[in-house]
Structure formats: C-alpha cells, structure tokens
Image: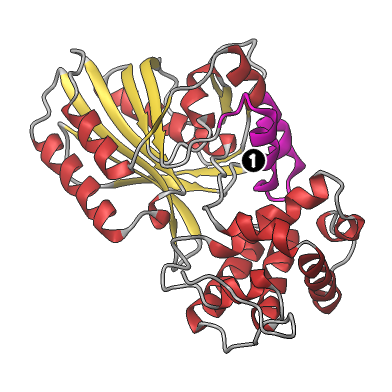
Amino acid sequence: MEPITPSPTGTLPNPAPNPDVVRAIAWQADHGDKNHAPITARVVRAQLALLTGPTQVGRLMANWGDTVMEDALPLRLTGGLHHLHLTARDDRLGAVFRGEVTDQAAIDAVIGAVVADHDADLLPWLDGPPQTNEAGRSASIMAALLWLSDRLGPRFELNELGASAGVNTMLDRFRFDLGGVVTGPEASPMRIVPQWIGPPPPAVPVVITAIRGCDRAPVDLTDPHAAQRLKGYVWADNPQRLDRLDAAIALARAARPRVDHADAGDWVGARLAAPQDTDTTRVIFHSIVWQYLPEATRAAITAGILATGARASASRRLAWVRLETNRETFRHELTVRHWPGPDEDVVLGNAHAHGAWVEWMG
C-alpha cells in the first residue's frame, strides 16, 4: 500500500471508502452478533465511521485492497482497541468493553475519539492479522480425534495450520470433558468443558505421539509483551477466554509449544512428505484459519492432502480435521476426511466460534 501523506493543513482527505471494506466491517459485526458477541460487534460496527474520518487508521482502512475479508481487517483494529483497554491506557474504553454502553452512536463517538488520540499507536495493529488461536476450539478437534480413534486406531501425529502462539498444539496437555467423556491429564490447568449438545463422542483412547504447528508470524507465549498483545485479540464478551489464555501461558512456560515459522502451503507439503511412524494416523488440522489463506495456498494444500490420502495405507493413515466458518450460515462446521476410508467429507457437528458449545452429530 502507498504511504499516507497528510495534507498541508495536517488533516487527511476523506475519500469514498472501498465498498469491500464497508461490506467486510458489516459482515464481521453481524458475525459477532450471531455468535453472541454484541460488545465486539458494536466495536467493529463503529469502524464504519472511521472510514471517512481524518485519521491515518481510517484512511488506511478505507483504501484497503480486495483481500479485506481474508485479512480480517476489522478484527485487527478491534485487537488494538481492546489492548488499550486491557493495559488501562484509555479510560473511555472501559464502559464500551464492559458492555455498559450499548447505544451505537455513543460507541461510534468514543471509538472515533480514541482512534484520533491514539492514531499512531493503533496504526501498526493493521500490519498483521489477528492472532486468536482459541483453546476452546480444541474441544471440537479432540472430539474428532475420538471419532477417528474409534475407526482408525488411537495413535495420532498432529500438525496444525495457522497455529499462532501454539495454544492448540498443546492440546495433548488439556483436560477435556466432552459430553461426559473425559480425557487428558487430570492435573492440567487447562479445563475444556463446553456445553455439549447431542450424544457424546466415543469413549476411546487417544494417544498423541507428536504435535507441532506452523504460522507465518508465530507468537511467543513466554514473552510477556507478546502474551499481552495476544490478549488484545480476545473478544471482550467472554472473560473465560482470558482465563484459558492464562492457562495456556502457564503451559507454554512449563514446556514451549513447537510452532514453525513457515508458510502454510510449504509447511503442509513438507509435513506430508516427512517419514511417518507405522500404525499412526497423520492429522492435518486447523480451526478458523482457512478463510485467511490465499486461494492458491488453499488449492495447493487441498491437492497435496488428496494426493497423499490416495497413497495412505492401513498402517500409515491420514486425516484432515477442520473447524471452519460457513460464510452463508455463519456456523462453524467440524468436518473430517480420512484415508483409508470413504473418500468424502463427514460433517461431525457445529461449534461456537470460541468453544462455548459443541453440537455433535458424529
């Protein structure tokens, strides 16, 4: 993008914003409402007024390219604003992020004033995507592993795309209660107990022999500044998510998760080509990541997985586990495909975006 140059008067022109940006902000706000996150929805919706305002942040957002949805632009700024609140740098945001103010016009005014006063500090938050690999989503991943164990056997090698800080590459250290099916270390500080809708998953063993992930910009959970920044991306509507992040930070300090700094397409190709233990299912998994990957990367990953699946055997198996957003229904669908097996996707259920509930159909 071209650099932003103020006019001689010190203000910026107010161009007509890119319609794709307007649509993306509206979509993200609606998505928040549909996922019981009204605070986040209101903060996102307030960004519409910034697009024709005088700030550098508003100007940059208004001129964003056609990748605005993939870039999760509204959530980038939301993270920066929440970080200002969590670090007590602007008292005006307290009533907004605590949900005490619900009038959209009043929130628009607060967000506009805060962005104007913190313009330079907030601008870098637009440089990279939100890092929100939520531990609650691991409930769906573990449920899928239980379903796969019942069909393929208990041993798994896990590989996560878009692992961010590696929170869910530590799921072998989480304690789960999934509809009454309990698994994982009893003493774990991470307790994953979603509201469970439907029958329980199979009560069978899951043995994770190895687990690692990749991200283009991995976050070090053991770095206090990085961890505090990560908290900014947590939606304010659910304080339990901050508690889970604190538990993840404690686990990372005890044993740092393995997250490779790599492009997802290149990394998946390398992982699929790596030697595989016998009597093991190699799992490629991701949660709320697919929409952020370029189309060419998605196509390459899909082709690589399908080609490798065609060569899978009973002793060296492959599975693809996905918890991703259906943009038409706003539902987050848990989908599994495995080889050997029927060469088709199986929808095991739906889940809340941040793990509050799982609707199991497995």
Q: Residue furthest front?
A: 8
Q: Nearer the viewer, residue 3 or 310?
A: 3
Image coords of residue 213 (percent x, y): 40, 30
Q: Residue drawn at (33%, 42%), measured in percent from left and top?
A: 263
Color theme of the render:
secondary structure
Q: Quick check: 166 left or right of 37?
A: left
The secondary structure making up most of the magenta span is: helix
Residue at image location 57% in from the left, 24% down from the top: 176
Answer whether residue 242 is magenta in the image.
yes
Up-down relation of residue 154 to residue 65 (above or below): above
Region rendered in magenta:
220-247
Q: Amino acid at mark 1?
A: Leu
From where the camera sits, is residue 195 visible?
yes
Q: Mark 1 Cα within 10 Å, few/some/many (few <14, many 20+)?
A: many
Can you tell which quarter of the image residue 67 is in?
bottom left
The residue that label 1 is drawn on is: 230
Tell whether 341 sits left or right of 290. Answer: left
- Quarter of the image with the C terminus in it: top left
Asked if residue 180 shows in the view, the reply is: no
In the rendered image, which quarter is residue 240 located in?
top right
In this picture, residue 116 sits left or right of residue 335: right
Query: Where is residue 89 drawn, in percent x and y?
Result: 85, 50
Residue 227 falls within the magenta-colored stretch: yes
Q: In this picture, is 237 found above or below 110?
A: above
Label 1: state its secondary structure: helix
